[in-house]
Amino acid sequence: MSTLANQLVLAERQDVARGIRLLLGRPLITERGDPAAFELIRRRQDLLAKWFDYNCGWQLVVEPRLGYARLFKIRALPEASRPARRLRSGKAPFDRRRYTLLCVVAAELLPAPVTTVGLLADRVVQACATDEALPPFDTAARSERMAFVDVLKLLESFGALLAVDGVTENFVDSAKAKVLYRVDATVLMRLLAAPVGPSRLAVPAEDVPLRFEELLRGSVRESRYGGADASDAQRNLGLRHSVLRRLLDDPVLHHDELGADELAYIGSPTGRQIVRRAAEQGGFVLEERADGLLLVDPDGIATDSRFPDDSATARVAALLLLDPLTAAPDGLTPEQLTVEANALLRRFPQWAKSYQSEDGAQRLAADAVRVLDDFGLVRRIGDRTVPRPAALRYRTTVTEGPAT
């Protein structure tokens, strides 16, 4: 093979590896939002689509004319570790009210290629008033306008909504603010990744709270894997996809999180080979340990959230609390964690200002444990927070600077 051919093959492999990690980190990429990333995915779309289909069973849709690429990531068991977030300082997760408004706003945007913030708010008011299942929407309340703006900013970040004149945040201060939007209905319709649409699970509104978990599982049920009478081929396909989906979504995969069939699969020569090849093709470093598997992205491209990370007080506290946690194999109680958090607040009195209150240590401990739980570094057994093997990778050190 010629030198040029070798270079082309190497370039293709590097592009595919980068494209895989780009899409894992951002399953919706628009040409307007990231032209370079979109061009790479457009150029290698066939290879990327085949990789995701084979390894994960996820569909990749690339629309060059419409300027977007969408990876439909599905989990067999829905979980809430990656909520929609408010794109303001703190990036707090969406609450029930914002999720409700997100659904209503998306529905009201579909028929209108162009709209204004006022017209859209009026349509949402009317939609909520005519549906008994929805609480009323009152634009006179600042809290309601703030929730509405959080929804609009999220849709703007997805590329489903474009403010062509005016600033969305102005609506928080005044319901008379003027903002003109262009709606991308195609992107809007691609936001939902569930293989079974909610309309196909339609039940009376009063039954939804009672059957919510059942309906949620039904929305991600995939027929390709069969049921109780699944063939060997279907079972193997389901095992491959379930293991790699979890490994690519949550890079730490402990053996005790897997079922007996999944453990047997990754322990088999074929399973190990498939996992190793997928990691190599994606540009990851795979660590195979006695307690599980770990994927590392050396470039951090596939990472939607980082740890350690000093961007939030709770994440700093989470790292600092790992030392006492890993020193207690049986875990710590909420009271013991609160004592540790209180020691941190006393040690650094100018730090964590929002937690320097009577119940601050308790809140800081709870927020830090939530961070560690989301990253798979601890688990809760009864009332105790117990460190997982991956937590032992971290140690905090103190660096003494020059005397001032």
Image (cartoon, rainbow, N blue to C red):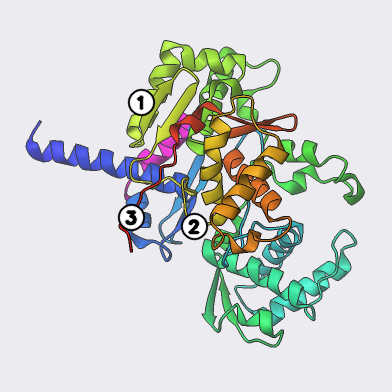
Q: Residue at x 46, y 11 (%)?
A: 268
Judged left or right of residue 182, residue 177 is right
Q: Nearer the viewer, mark 2 or mark 3?
A: 3
Label 2 or label 3, whichever comes before in sequence order:
2
Element assignment for label 2:
loop
Is disc 3 in contact with disc 1, using a CB cutoff of under 8 Å?
Answer: no
Mark nearer the viewer, 2 or 1: 2
Q: In terms of sequence position, does the residue under pointer 2 or pointer 1 come before the other?
A: 1
Position of 290 relative to 217 (above/below):
above
Judged from the image, the secondary structure of the residue bearing numbered disc 1 is helix
Side of 379 relative to 295 (left or right): right
- The residue beneath circle 1 is 277
Q: Quadrant of the N terminus?
A: top left
The span shown in magenta is: 43-55
Q: Main secondary structure of the magenta part?
A: helix
Q: In this orientation, which residue lies closer to the viewer: 156 or 389?
A: 389
Viewer-side label of 3, 1:
3
Q: CA distance from mark 2 to mark 3?
A: 22 Å
Image disc number at residue 401? 3
Placement of 320 over or under 149, stated as above or below: above
Q: Position of residue 128 (x, y in %)?
A: 83, 67
Residue 68 highlighted magenta (yes or no): no
Measure the C-alpha gap from mark 3 to mark 1.
45 Å
Residue 311, numbered label: 2
- Mark 3 or mark 1: name the one nearer the start of the chain: 1
Residue at image location 38% in from the left, 56% down from the top: 38
User: Which amino acid, mark 3?
Assistant: Gly
Coordinates of residue 253 in the picture (x, y in percent) = 52, 28
